[in-house]
Each structure stands twice: as C-alpha cells, then as structure tokens.
Amino acid sequence: MTQTNIVIDAAFDSGNIEVVSIDGAKAHLRIPNDRNSEFAQWFHFRVSGAAGRELELTIDQLADSAYPEGWPGYHSCVSEDRSFWGRAESSYNKTAGSGTLTIRYTPASDMAWFAYFAPYSIERHNDLVAEAASMPGVDYRRLGETLDGRSVDCLEMGEGETQVWFYARQHPGESMAEWWMEGALEVLTDPADPVGRVLRKKCRLHVVPNCNPDGSFRGHLRTNANGVNLNREWADPSAERSPEVLAIRNAMDESGVDFAMDVHGDEAIAAVFLAGFEGIPSWTDEQGERMYRYQRILARRTPDFQTAKGYPKSAAGKANLTISTNQVAERFGACAMTLEMPFKDNDDWPDPDQGWSPERCKLLARECLAALVEWLDDN
C-alpha cells in the first residue's frame, strides 16, 4: 500500500522554506534568501499528515547559506503544540548536496512545526507590547514606521536619571532575542519584583522588543523588508533604507544613552557572550572598564554566561561605526554592548531535549537585569 505524501507549507508569520520534492514521509527542501539579499539561514515550516511516521527532511545547499558554521552540531527546533519547543535529531553533511542538514523526527500528532529557533510571532509581539503598556507606570511610544507600515514599538518606564536602552531583533531570525525581551519586560513591569523596582527607581528605561518587525514577519534571517541589514546602518540611517534605525537613533538622541544592550543570537558559537566597543575612536580605558565590570558581574551571577568564547576585539581606531554598539558607545559615551545567545545549545551547560531555549532566554534576561542593579550600585 502506497503511503500518502506529507504536506509542507510555510505561508504564515515568519514562515520560510522551499519544497523541492516530497516522497511519502521524506522531503527535499531549500531555504530561500531574504528578499533582495544574499542572506539565507532562517527556516520555519509546518508538516502535516505526519502522525506516527518517521520524517526525513533534508535541506541542501547550506554551504552557500549565510553562516555555514551554524550547521555542524545543530539540531532543528520542533514543536507539536507551538508552546513547547524541543530539538529533533539532525545531522549535517558538508560534502553532500553542497551541505545538507537531515532532520529526523516521528510526531505523535498529525502536525509538527520545525524552525531554526523557536519563533516569536508578530501576534505574540503585539500581545507583549499591549500587556506591558497596560501596566502602571509604563509609557508606550511609537518611534516610527517600517517600510511595510508596521510600528516600531517602544516601552518606557522608570523615574531615574540613568538612561538605559534595551533593543532586540535587528536581525529578525534571531528570535531568541525577543524571548529575552519577554523575560525582561516581565521583570520590569512587575510592581512586586525587587529587581524591576530598583531599576525603575534608578533609571529611565527604553525597551524596543523588536527593531525589525517586517523581517520577522517575512521570515528573514538578517534584513528588513528591502534586504537591508539594520545593524550596518547606524552611522547614517535613512528613511528610504532603514527607517527602523533612524527612528530608534533619533529617540536615543532625545534621551541620551548611559547603558545600552543590543540583543542578538549567534549561529555558530554555542555559548552566551557579550561583544563590546573596542576600537572606537573615542575609546578610553575608563569607559571600557565599565563594560568589563558588567561582564564580570554577569559571569558571576549565572553559569549560562561566559567570557572565554566570543568575537575578536577590534584594533584601536578600527571599530565599525555602522554597528549599533560601536555607534552608541561613540555617540553617547555609553556603556554599550551586544548580547549574543546561541542557536545551538550552550555547550557549557547542554540540554539535550531543548538546547538553548525560550525558557533559558527569559531566565538570562532576569540575570542581565539583576547584574545591572549591581553594576549601578558601584557606578
């Protein structure tokens, strides 16, 4: 008896896959590029007709993806209820099909959802913003409008003089960044939370949970609706190319910035780490030490953070000022940093069932905020 073919579709919020062929429970897939861009890495699709069948899903041409080193040791995220995201057994063969990832999974139910990381939908984003904005002492600001006409949402709170900016998902496929934001906003908007209470008393907080809602909805890895990498626009943003960055930077110019964290995910490095602003023209050891002290505090607070692995530091005077952390540190004299979380797992503290997960993103957010409380005490 011939088995019916599974059905694969991605015509939904953040969906992205190309179906080359399907044979029973096996499928041959490819990842389309971001629109007007060479970047390809994010995938998110649904398989139906799959209950009790061992799926074999192969994605090829990954040697030409944005970050080929993201695939060795990577296991696809999978969910049957879109609430709990686990990991499906996946293997990468760099010599087959110009780099092939093979995902194997047997769903208990008829549908299974696969993604590069647990998705964070625009609807969930809207719920997050609406819930936070309804809390006492929280002000909502619409900083600007994207190329597709979406809002650049900002939540502001606190009565202190220290200007703190948290912003995430310049690169929309790095959905772990908005899971981190959900955890941060739960702390910051809870009237009973002592960490939130201290930060609201000492700081004026500006939170942009999603800098790139167009790219998020379109299923892009790294760019906005017109294929522009927002984190290379900070030196000279424009309404035509990067209205998202222009809106955020203009708001920063109004408030000033003392402390800034730009939240991201890294495809290849299986660790949580911070990248700083070494190499900016105005670098001083005093400004740098403020950042290094924050790193030391966070490393002491949580074993999920470490300082041994990360990006190489820029040489003196060689920092790329189109990148937000460098631009913000240079422009405002701020203690600025980029937080990176893994798409894979945290190799120091691996979790075979989930790898790096939404739950761990949210827990890390609380530790980052608690580290900021301690940092403020000594600043």
Image (cartoon, helix red, strand yellow):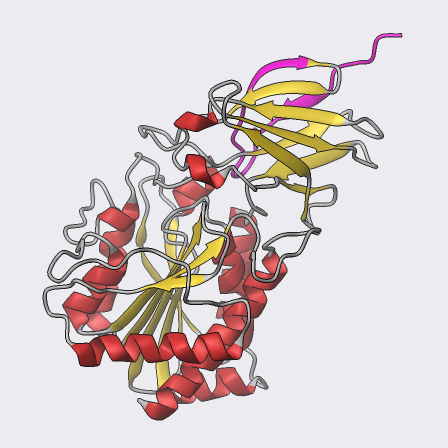
Does the rendering let one see residue 14?
Answer: yes
Q: Nearest the camera: 270 or 246?
A: 270
Instruction: Assign the magenta stretch its main secondary structure.
Output: loop
Answer above or below: position of 346 versus 101.
below
Is 19 included in the stretch rendered in magenta? yes
Measured from the top left, where is residue 198 in percent x and y? 46, 88
Q: Is residue 260 left or right of residue 280?
A: right
Does the rendering let one see residue 250?
Answer: no
Measured from the top left, where is residue 7 in percent x and y? 69, 21
- Which residues, given as a range, are shown in magenta? 1-22
The C terminus: image quadrant = bottom left
Picture quarter containing residue 103?
A: top right
Question: Which residue is found at the position 21% from the left and 48% from the top?
Answer: 233
Answer above or below: position of 351 versus 112.
below
Question: Which residue is found at the position 51% from the left and 54% from the top?
Answer: 176
Measured from the top left, where is residue 40 in percent x and y? 42, 31
Measured from the top left, where is residue 134 in percent x and y? 52, 71
**Numbered circles on residues, count:** 0
Residue placed farthest to the top in the image?
Answer: 1
